[in-house]
Image: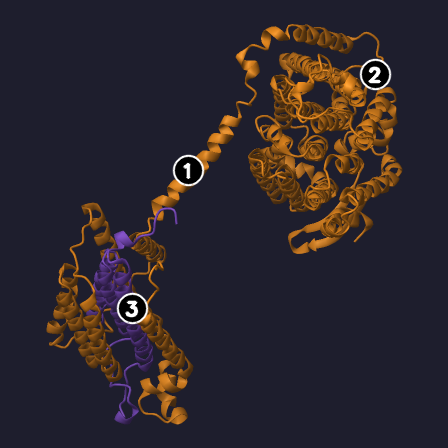
Chain colours: A orange, B purple
Amino acid sequence: MSALHWVILSPFLFALIIPFLFKYVSKIHTGWFVWLLPTALFIYFMNWLPVISSGQVVETTISWIPALGIDFTAYLDGLSMLFVLLITGIGSLVVLYSIFYLSKKERLGNFYVYLMLFMGAMLGVVLSDNLIVLYVFWEVTSMASALLISYWFHKDKSTKGAQKSMLITVAGGLAMLGGFILLYQMTGTFSIRTIIDNVDVVQASPLFVPAMLLILLGAFTKSAQFPFHIWLPDAMEAPTPVSAYLHSATMVKAGIYLVARMTPVFGGSNVWFWTLSIVGLVTLLWGSISAVRQKDLKGILAFSTVSQLGLIMSLLGVGSAALTVGADDPIYSQAILVAIFHLFNHATFKGALFMAVGIIDHETGTRDIRKLGGLMTVMPITFTVSLIGLASMAGLPPFNGFLSKEKFFSAMLNVRNFEAFDVGSLGFLFPLIAWIASIFTFLYSLIMFFHTFRGKFEPSNYERKVHEAPIGMLISPIILVVLVIVFGLFPNLLSYSIIEPAKQAILPTVLPEGEQFVVNIKIWHGVNTELLMTLGVVLIASFLFYLMHRWAKLAIYNRERDPFNWFYDNALTGLTSGSQWITRLQMTGLLRDYFAYIFTFMLLLVGYTFWRFDAFAIDTANTSVIEPFMWILIPLLIGAIVTIPFLNHRITAVIVVGVIGFLLALLLIVFRAPDLALTKLLVETVTLVIFMLAFYHLPEMRKEKFTPRLNVANLLISIGVGVMMTLVALSSAALGNEAGYESISDYFLENAKELAGGYNVVNVILVDFRGLDTLLEVLVLAVAALGIVTLIKLRLKGGEDV
Amino acid sequence: MEILMSITVGVLFMVGTYLLLTKSLLRIVLGLILLSHGAHFLLLTMSGLQSGTPPLLNLNSEAYADPLPQALVLTALVISFGMTSFLLVLSYRTYKAFKTDDLEQLRGSADE
């Protein structure tokens, strides 16, 4: 166990003591204790930053299931570094924020346990080199996410949202597991490092594309890519700190992480490039358009997150082209740089915005933009924070969002010049879609800003007196917007400390050993296409906003719910009603049906075995003689048996069954089994007596009323069973003779006298050799007798239902 | 003889199964009796019939009938007797409690 392993496990271990802290130290808000952990971890990882920035990696392994090639390998490189800093850094800010957001009356114990579970699992995802370990942590994040979404489980929407996110992300996770197993099939290892080293094997394999698509399915569901994005807006039912942490900064980026991590394996292929680019761009456009229609502030941010995740995804797709070129060509590899940079920027400004929305919700009691307005003067600090966050999201200088938006445009413009992947004339679509989506991004930023902070303040819209939030709640968003400004003005603080090592990790084969990517982010590039595009975005979006009072009346604007929910809702109800239908079909509650299933299955199984092993055999040579009187006895017996189903009088039926029993006893004498015959006679007599006693109380038998179809089915099944048993009897006798096994009966015949001193071998077996069996048999009889006595004697009290 | 008995066993199983598939509790009890008859004779038949004398050592015979299946069947015989009696009383009790022996009416409700 190295320090890194302990770091991954520390949130889980800490989660164990949180309930006790909550219960016994109720004076202090539990969040203060929890806050220490992410902060400490953040400082710990910051200490590693210089090491990682210099291009080194940390790798330690402990064996977990070596027989299956599953080792718990912790691996820290540039890409993991970026994520662990986000997880611990934002985590610490979110916990701090939550201390003021959630009152001490809430079930804080549960909340922080879930949050710590999530944090540990997320650290595990980004620090695991082993795919199976990664998968396990991946599913734990889904679980923790669902638990946090349903934190206020008394609300119906919360549980529905949790269920939705769980179903979608876990289904994707399972697909991803399938992809991982295919990778194992190809390479024989679960280690990502080793798979990247054997990338030739993977790329030559026919399983390459299936594995890729399955893994992408996992990434797309987790990162809320079109058309799986529908769970993210519903996840906004979670407490706002959770939305800021899981559903904008970290968990939804796990898919991005996976795609980045897998780029060295799958990148450079046609399918990878097109799938990521198309899905990313469609998500970007769809998310930004849908965000405009939202009336709930968190709804806007949710769709905005969807669209920004699409942006990053498309950049990773475009950037994967660098792996085909072989050398570092900025035209191709720049997109990866932008993806990393924007990932970081998005976490800062979106985190700040979520927290600001949380403050508004907390202080005013509503998030509906139709009710809000004029908060600028009432909540000046929240206003400032939101202004900066929104400006950064919209892509205005001098904030970091502007830089990544500009870089995004230029990366997309570069696609026009791609020679790989037959981009050709389709290249112009990339910047075009990016530009249109940016217009909508700007538009919803404007809507959020003007409808919340400008306009007239209407105190009657709110249930409480509105005022600025306490300072503690404002600390975290202020820190984040300070970062937004700092990285906007001095982006190169990040260049070689975080961005370059992460890019190295995503594109390990592009550069020769020891060289570094050139990362230079500048605010002012002169007047170029990108700047003109930004100007166009600002102008058109402002114009659209100016016309809003006209298009706001359109029906499409007022329909908030994403149309893709239709598929999910129908699939879910269809699944429930479908399984109910199937269950009702088979679980009829009628004994007859269950017996029919059992017999049919038995018939199929034995029939298949007969057919498969060609097991039918009949032995006519080794049979004993049929004595003449048998020709009377056996037909009589068969005749008696066959009449029973036709009898409708209980007395007749009992007598016929008795006749059968006595005939069989007669047969036993012929078969040299005197003890059996004796017992049989006794048993049959007593049975007959009991029958008579019971029949006295039972109703007369009725004719069976079955539909002809059921009757035919019953007949077929019973004839089948009869034929099957005959065949089994014949074949086992014949095959037994053929095999010529030595019978163990000889042992009893030889030893009955010597060891047990008895002449009647059957009796000796029963009372001596297998005496314990007989004892237990007596026990069975005793239990049956007890049951009978109870059933007869027990009188249930008057009103009691049986 | 073995072939003839195999067929008889088959008939026992066939009629037993048919009775099991009916709706009347009584017929089901009868069916189970026939099924257990079938099982006992299946065991006996498979070990070979009518060879030698009964397994009584004081007969001083050259060959005895196989004692092991007989011991097994003896056990089974007693157990199936216990089961039959219990079933009979159970159906008696069921009839007392529900005033019907029709399984169609005794089935559980759909929501159970």
In this rendering, position of residue A609 left or right of residue B49: right
**Is residue A83 in view from this perspective?**
no
Residue shown at the point (86%, 40%) measured from the top left: A43
User: Regarding mark 1 in the picture, which secondary structure is present there?
Assistant: helix
Image coordinates of residue A218 in percent, x first then y, are 61, 35
Separation (CA) of disc 3 from disc 1: 51 Å
- Residues at marks 3 and 1 touching, judged by CB atoms closer than 8 Å: no
Placement of A184 over or under A409, stated as above or below: below
The answer to whether tags 3 and 1 share a subunit is yes
Task: Residue B87: name its quadrant.
Answer: bottom left
Which chain letter matches label 2? Answer: A
Residue highlighted by disc 1: A577
Q: In the image, what residue type sits under mark 2?
A: Pro
Q: In the image, what residue type sits under mark 1?
A: Ser
Image coordinates of residue A670 in percent, x first then y, are 19, 80
Residue shown at the point (65%, 55%) measured from the top left: A67
Dot label at residue A799: none
Dot label at residue A734: 3
User: Regarding mark 2 in the picture, which secondary structure is present there?
Assistant: loop
Which chain letter matches label 3? Answer: A
* Count of number-bearing discs: 3
Residue highlighted by disc 2: A398
